[in-house]
Image (spheres, rainbow, N blue to C red):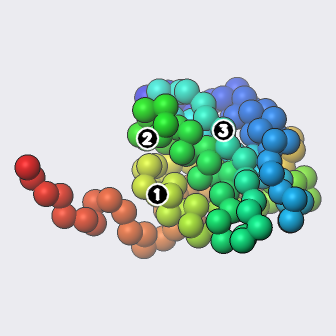
Amino acid sequence: MSKITDELIQKMLREALLVREKAYVPYSKFKVGACVCAEDGELFTGCNVENASFRLTNCAETSAICNMIAAGKKRILAILIVGPNITMITPCGACRQVIREFAALDAPIYLCDDTNVLLKTTVAELLPLSFGPEHLPIKKS
């Protein structure tokens, strides 16, 4: 498992800022970037992608996690999220559940503006009393 250092957090912020600029947001104009650090230290990014139906919009966090899964990784060490430099944003409810699927309850979540971490929280703090994979029965073959 990789160690979360200040340098890693700053690298994650730079990556999230870069991908944020690629966001497809013709309706809200609200660009969001996210960077996921897999357990082995590899970074994956994602941005929000809107859709005219709105309900089919993909959030940055889920996009980054999907990129991680597509690369064959399964566990999140940390996640960083940056929105427009107007205020701190937090993951929506759907993203919180997706993060919960692939991260430990104590996995750090960094909520940032363009230059700083504004809040360090965890999966458990953002999604208390959550439902996760361990709640489902596992069928043995």
Q: Is residue 56 left or right of residue 31?
A: left
Numbered disc 1: secondary structure: helix
Instruction: Find numbered disc 3 in the image and state the secondary structure of the residue it sits on.
Output: strand
How much space separates mark 3 and mark 2, taking CA atoms?
Answer: 15 Å
Question: Which is in the foreground here, disc 3 or disc 2?
Answer: 3
The residue singled out by tag 2 in the image is 75
Q: Position of residue 114 (x, y in %)?
A: 87, 44
Residue where numbered disc 1 is placed: 100
In the image, what residue occupies the spot 55% across and 45% down?
A: 65
Residue at x-position 68% and y-position 51%: 60
Q: Residue furthest left?
A: 141
* Mark 2: few/some/many CA within 10 Å (<14, 14-19, 20+): some
Residue at 32% x, 59% y is 133
Q: Is residue 79 above or below residue 83?
A: above
Q: Residues within 10 Å of mark 3 (few under 14, many from 20)?
A: many
Q: Amino acid at mark 2?
A: Arg
